[in-house]
Image (cartoon, grey):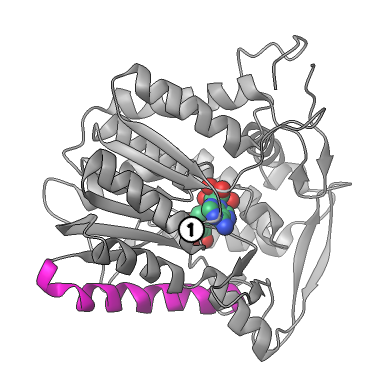
Amino acid sequence: MIVEPKVKGFICTTAHPTGCEKNVLRQIEYVKRKGKIDGAQKVLVIGASTGYGLASRITAAFGMGAATIGVSFEKEATGKRTATPGYYNTKAFDNMAINEGLYSKSVNGDAFSREIKDEVISLIKKDLGKVDMVIYSLAAPRRTTADGTTYTSVLKTVGEPFTQKNWNLKDNTIGEATIPVANSDEILSTVKVMGGEDWSDWIDALVEADAIKDGAITVAYSYIGPELTYPIYHEGTIGKAKAHVSETAIKISEKYRDRMINAYVSVNKALVTQASAAIPVVPLYLSVLYKIMKNKGIHEGCIEQMDRLYRDKVYGLDGRKIETDGMIHVDDYEMREDVQREVMDVWNTIDSNNLKAYADIDGYWLDFYNMFGFEIDGVDYSLEVEV
Ligand code: NAI
């Protein structure tokens, strides 16, 4: 069929298989151009099909030459419905990796569940023996725990409601969005879903099954961002979950000190992904940030971030780059003093009339459409494709 984008709010309900494939190829080519990374050889990526997880897997495979197993939760095509982008990305990745002689297998299912953990661990034991790196890049709306309780994560503030400028994506106007206050159940639920508990469960399960090497490393991702977004992010429900991820890293490293398994948190840059497009206020911040960072020649996307993370900061020649807060930072360009000062200057003056001049609206939408395989150079969208 001919596949066209169908955008509803912050989500596109269709995805283009050829576009997704090209998107994966573009990221692979980027990493290959940068050359070899002397890193892990057997890598498990949880949340491997889109965004930071996909870019991490590409970096591991095509930079480090690693065998990879990817876990994600994606939908196949049914009838006239296309599959989700992560589904096409994963197929494309598997094909391209295997074509280059790299081991690649992907498991589609709920990473929170015991069944998927068991399935992945059996696969590791059968095919790889043990992994030497585990990347945890899940971004999920809900989690059902072993006792059958379902927790849903919310994007709310903690303490006070927060009102801030907001870009109305439908009509390109600037208005305001008020983010309501979470109650204690909502905070707990968000920590259950986006905190470190499941990450820790994965490492425990891998250790128990003897499917992880001594000296292995595990990395999870976080975001801090500028004070402007603190109430909604860093100090909000999601920030509470991310604080739990940081505490979990310390606990994992302590628990497995004798096996030298080290857990790290990498603080990444704010980028347009399916997860971040859903947060109010953030798209405006992103589009202002993109404009400023592009003008300075320091803008990065997922692949540039993940390549730099593993090449320079995790497996760099002069050792691991852990900052004073105990975390690895690839948000360093975003948080540069000059960048943030300019963001604030723009933020204070931006309105519906000057939006296009101050914010990278086109860049935002290009990234958004690209995520679903649309507006990718070299793809003829008038052709029928097999979905
Ligand atoms: P994303 O939405 O692009 O990717 C999420 C991944 O998780 C996908 O592979 C999806 O299939 C998988 N997934 C979701 N639920 C699952 C489940 N139940 N079982 C198995 N797989 C499941 O998200 P993004 O933005 O790449 O986020 C990844 C991590 O990076 C998150 O921890 C996020 O907080 C963090 N991060 C994101 C930033 C951003 O601006 N997007 C900035 C800094 C950190």
Q: Nearer the viewer, residue 143 or 306?
A: 143
User: Is 255 one of the magenta-colored residues?
Assistant: yes
Q: Quadrant of residue 291?
A: top right
Residue ranking furthest to the right? 171
Q: Residue at x 62, y 79 (%)?
A: 189
- The image position of residue 308, as x and y in percent, is 32, 43
- The image position of residue 187, as x and y in percent, is 62, 83
What residue would you read off at disc 1?
Answer: 115
Q: Quadrant of the C terminus?
A: top right
Q: Nearer the viewer, residue 387 or 276?
A: 387
Q: Is residue 366 visible?
A: yes
Q: Quadrant of the N terminus?
A: top right
| Mark 1 closeness class: few <14, some 14–19, many ≥20 residues within 10 Å | few
Q: Is residue 230 above or below residue 382?
A: below
Q: Is residue 32 above or below residue 41?
A: above
Q: Nearer the viewer, residue 197 or 231?
A: 197
Which type of secondary structure does the marked residue at label 1 adopt? helix
Queried on whether the Cβ of the residue with tag 1 lies below 8 angstroms from ligand 1, the answer reads no
Q: Residue at x 54, y 21 (%)?
A: 22
Q: Residue at x 84, y 49 (%)?
A: 353
Q: Is residue 271 visible?
A: no
Q: Which residues are magenta?
A: 236-259
User: Is 278 one of the magenta-colored residues?
Assistant: no
Q: Amino acid at mark 1?
A: Glu
Q: Main secondary structure of the magenta part?
A: helix
- The image position of residue 119, as x and y in percent, is 42, 51
Q: Residue at x 82, y 35 (%)?
A: 6
Q: Is residue 61 above or below residue 237?
A: above
Horizontal side of 331 relative to 183 (left or right) equals left
- The image position of residue 82, as x and y in percent, is 74, 30
Q: Quadrant of residue 198?
A: bottom left
Q: Nearer the viewer, residue 255 or 177?
A: 255
